[in-house]
Amino acid sequence: MIPAAYAVLNLDAVAHNLAVVRRCAPEAKIMAVIKANGYGHGLLRIAEVLASADAFAVARVDEGIRLRKAGITKRIAVLEGFTCLEEFEALLAYHLDAVVHSAVQVDILEQRKEQGVCAIWLKLDTGMNRLGFKAKEFDAIYQRLTQCSIIKQPINLMTHLANADDLKDDTTHTQIKRFKETLATMTLALQTGSECSIANSAGILAWHEALSDWVRPGVMLYGISPFLDRTGEQLGLKPIMELHSRLIAVKSLDVGDKVGYSGTWVCEKPTLLGVVAIGYGDGYPRYAKAGTPILVNGQRVPLIGRVSMDMITVDLATQPLAKPGDTVTLWGEGLPVEEIALAADTIPYTLVCGVTQRVQIVEKSDLR
Ligand SMILES: *Cc1c(COP(=O)(O)O)cnc(C)c1O
């Protein structure tokens, strides 16, 4: 039986997208970002198809532990590092690289006597003002960390770009400049073998100066564009996820009939209404506006009325032969997830990350 709501993953496309990263950054090593359950595609499944990446990055220690428990031996960086001693012990036990961004972490590291067992990425805050040390404190922190016995020297250095998806915004240029200047003016010269990392997907695709020893692609690996004004396909990427459901009812409504909760949609003409078995309980965005395109049997029809937990409603005026059981695509071939994100005032990241447990995941290779 075909499930009501299901996502089809074309995992073959991951290798293609990884090759695009390599083409954009031929000299860099690739730290594939697979946090948040591989951007909603499945942590272990994505790790498996990214076996040729040089390292993985996750946000949290427990995500790294899941990878280790599944037998993954590749280098794994934890982008949020650790917050307390207990978490640090777990990170050490599972041989995860720590991003070091706060004084609390430095204090924990300094108290340890082990020799060279913890690889770190020291983070400079170049303007995002989220994680990382400010330029003025960076020099002193760096000196302290070079003296820490537990740290595996050399120390690696990183920063994160806040606005790289906006090609007209000068912030990225300023951030990269600040990163390079801070490193160049430190009291201690950088240790030999010390490596740097700046670029996320947008940095890799649009900011050549952001390329350095390591790049950290996330969203582009899943075939999705980091830019609002173009799709992954327009960038030569291949999307991985398609989201599907089916029609479960078709009915005729009269002028003046109201559709869905709060009756926000009022029929101005006799309307052939389709009810689709997917809603925000599956991760379809609650704020998708009336008119958001949806494919019924491969043809575009508009969303009407409110998105509810288990269902949405569409206007079938152009699909008079549609019937219960017919295939519906919420995003996928012919309907980029980027377009749905725009219609729902969000970004495609939230859509793929937000697909819920109820949605059955099917790998395309199993359908052949
Ligand atoms: C999530 C994340 C990335 C990947 O970002 P994309 O926009 O998905 O490429 C890279 N670096 C850090 C620090 C991140 O948090």
Image: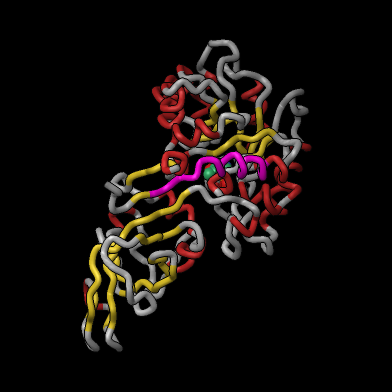
Judged left or right of residue 30, residue 250 is left
Q: In the image shown, does 53 or 12 lie closer to the viewer? A: 12
- Magenta segment boundaries in residue numbering: 7-21
Q: Main secondary structure of the magenta part?
A: helix
Q: Is residue 102 visible?
A: no
Q: In the image shown, does 313 or 207 lie closer to the viewer? A: 313
| Residue appearing at x 35%, y 79% in the figure | 317
Horizontal and vertical percent position of residue 320: 33, 77
| Residue appearing at x 40%, y 54% in the figure | 243
Q: Is residue 137 visible?
A: yes
Give the quarter the ligand 1 occupies. Answer: top right
Residue 163 painted magenta: no
Residue 14 painted magenta: yes
Horizontal and vertical percent position of residue 212: 73, 39
Q: In the image shown, does 130 or 35 lie closer to the viewer? A: 35
| Residue appearing at x 66%, y 25% in the figure | 155
* Depicted 336 relative to depicted 148: above or below: below
Horizontal and vertical percent position of residue 194: 71, 27
Horizontal and vertical percent position of residue 89: 43, 19
Judged left or right of residue 354, residue 17 is right
| Residue appearing at x 41%, y 21% in the figure | 69
Quadrant into which the C terminus falls: top left
Type of colouring: secondary structure
The quadrant in which residue 271 appears is bottom left
Q: How many marks?
A: 0
* Depicted 147 relative to depicted 311: above or below: above
Judged left or right of residue 79, residue 69 is left
Judged left or right of residue 210, residue 246 is left
The quadrant in which residue 319 appears is bottom left
